[in-house]
Image (cartoon, rainbow, N blue to C red):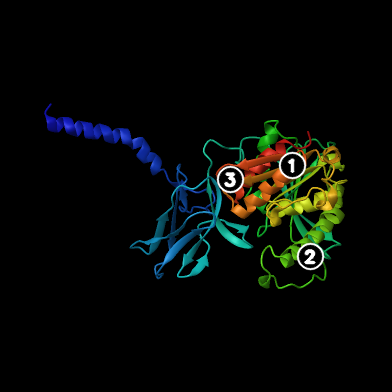
Amino acid sequence: MNKFTSCIGMFLLSCLICLPSLAEMNDFVPATTNVMNAKYPQVNSEGRVKLQIKAPDAVKVAVNFWSGPKMDMIKKEDGVWEVTTPAQVPGLHYYTFTIDGAGVSDPNSKAFFGGSRYVSAVEIPEPGSNYYSIQNVAHGQVRDIWYFSKVTGGWRHAMVYLPPQYEKQTKKRFPVLYLQHGGGEDETGWIRQGNANFILDNLIAEGKAKPMIIVMANGYPTRVNPEEIDMSKVQFGSPEWVKFFEKRMEVFEEEITQVLIPFVDKEYRTLNDRNNRAMAGLSMGGMQTYYVTTKNLPLFSYIGGFSGAGGFLTGGKFDPKTDYQGVFADPEAFAKKVHLLWLGIGTVEPENMRKGIHGLHQSLNDAGIKHVFIESPGTDHEWQTWRRNLQDFAQRLFK
């Protein structure tokens, strides 16, 4: 064997050795969030996303991931624009295209209600994790319900998850978790984006969570004659904004306690005492949860805030002695009433949000208030944070 042949052999061998890693880099497959038969967006095992959109007359096209990269796309000869993103963290990522300055949704993606509108999203699987995906286990039912509200003077919509045992064990009653969405999203979010039904199906099948009913209400109730305020002229976090938000939470509290809970207890086989009733929510829903539950401790004994809770709008400034009607002033009395106080946040969420939740966590520690605090590694203000939050929170309920 001469030197030339030997070199060729070594080269071919090195190529063979590299093939697995090359295959891994190019193992793009259509995302599970695509509409039927759509080939793009595609995701690979590294978490990279390849996108395409046809816009032959466009001058400039870009993609905007709301919690990720913003990238210009490259135009191909057939008028299709394409881009491949760097690796992103697992989870559901909202995005839009910007075509010559106009923000548009991707016709290849399913639409999800987020940011106060329907928007595209791509699911990037979490390697080695299946807690929020559909599995070969018994599945509960998700129902759309409508009920008339004396608070709003109109019909209201909510979604209800019934555990797998509900239809089979017809004499059994179940505890209830009221689970709220965030700002800009609606009552469909926990099912369509959060996969809450699959998370509970899997936990219940493994014996890690008690079978429970989950009620997901619309978080924007308004009175029959609401006070008109031009919020476009009010700065976020200002005293005027906080005052308006508190008024909205007052209406929400009345809606939950005076209308929705009695309706659910009447229509479904619930265990309708405080020891079997929980409430949690993400972001805005977390703030609503702390507001409602602390004012109504005779109704709730489990409280969860996912990226949102007390002190969220005040940079974590929180006085356990006086805030929330002073329910935290006596740690021992509070612990007897509340079986679980839970806080969660992603490690790369915006600094003001992290400051608020960390501040509340520290204030509770300083006051001797027993609670659970968990951080989701590597995730932003996004659904993967809240899926992880729900998985942990649900396992601690009704024990």
Q: Nearer the viewer, residue 329 or 286?
A: 329
Residue corresponding to mark 2 = 222
- Answer above or below: position of 33 versus 371: below
Q: Name the residue: 62% across, 58% down.
A: 114
Horizontal and vertical percent position of residue 277: 81, 43
From this viewpoint, which residue is outermost toward the top? 1
Task: Determine the secondary structure under disc 1.
Answer: helix
Q: Is residue 22 left or right of residue 281?
A: left
* Of callouts 1 and 2, the N-terminal one: 2
Q: Is residue 56 left or right of residue 13?
A: right
The answer for how far apart the CA atoms under marks 1 and 2 are is 37 Å
- Three-letter amino acid code at disc 2? Thr
Q: CA distance from mark 1 to mark 3?
A: 22 Å
Image quadrant where one finds the N terminus:
top left
Residue at image position (67%, 31%) is 206
Q: Nearer the viewer, mark 1 or mark 2?
A: 1
Q: Foreground: 253 or 287?
A: 287
Mark pair 2, 3: CA separation: 34 Å
Q: Residue at 66% x, 53% y: name it.
A: 189
Q: Which mark is residue 366?
A: 1
User: First in sequence: mark 2 or mark 3?
Assistant: 2
| Residue that label 3 marks | 347
Residues 347 and 148: in front is 347
Residues marked 1 and 3 touching at CB (< 8 Å)? no
Q: At label 3, which amino acid type do we have?
A: Thr
* Residue 352: quarter of image: bottom right
**Quadrant, the C terminus:** top right
Q: Residues within 10 Å of mark 2 (few under 14, many from 20)?
A: some
Measured from the top left, where is residue 346 in percent x and y? 60, 46
Crowd around label 1: few <14 · some 14–19 · many ≥20 (10 Å): few
